[in-house]
Amino acid sequence: FDNESSLFNFVVRDGNGVKGIVDSGISKIPPIDLSKLDGPDHDEVVNQIVRAAETLGFFQVVNHGVPVQLLDSLKQTAHNFFSLPAERKAVYRKEVSPSPLVKYGTSFVPEKERALEWKDYISMAYTNDDEALQQWPGCCSSIFEDIT
């Protein structure tokens, strides 16, 4: 895809959807080496991010310095939350959440979105361990074992 409009046309206007991108034979996504951000190649890395975001809409970052164990733990924590029954997740909906640190919602808002993103999300702000442990969903507290 050469630009944002060709991707939009393929996915939305032509009706191929995200599945169409996969079916088109895409076998890899652009990897961007973040270790080069602090060196003389800074501007090139920034341009790679912009190009990938504008044309394909996603990319992989490598050499970011985040330990794999922490990433795996974050993934499991998210899985734990999204596997909860709907009524347990709904407590944290952004409109009614009892915690200013936790917001659960969806990006599926057809009347507001130019491109539908079909995703649910949880945002958990961190201030300190004690406050997060008190206000984050219980199923998410195991992440502290890997952070500390």
Image: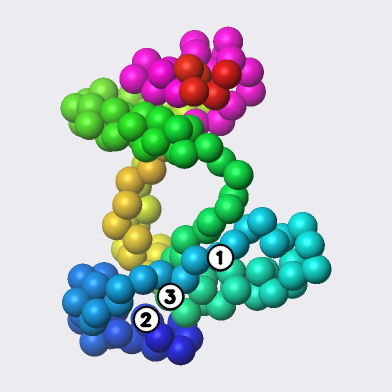
- Contact (CB < 8 A) between labels 3 and 1? no
Residue 77 vertical position relative to residue 10 in the rendered view, above or below: above
Mark 1 residue type: Ile
Q: Which residues are magenta?
A: 124-143
Front-most of 26 and 110?
Answer: 26
Q: CA gap, disc 2 to disc 3?
A: 9 Å
Mark whose residue sits in front, 2 or 1: 1
Location of mark 3 (residue): 56
Q: Dot 1: few (<14), some (14–19), or many (≥20) neighbours within 10 Å?
A: some
Q: Position of residue 144 (x, y in %)?
A: 50, 19
Q: Dot 2: few (<14), some (14–19), or many (≥20) neighbours within 10 Å?
A: many
Give me the disc on residue 32.
1
- Residue 9 as seen in the image, left or right of residue 125: left
Mark whose residue sits in front, 2 or 3: 3
Location of mark 2 (residue): 8
Residue 78 vertical position relative to residue 147 in the rendered view, above or below: below
| Residue at disc 2, secondary structure | helix
Q: Is residue 90 visible?
A: no
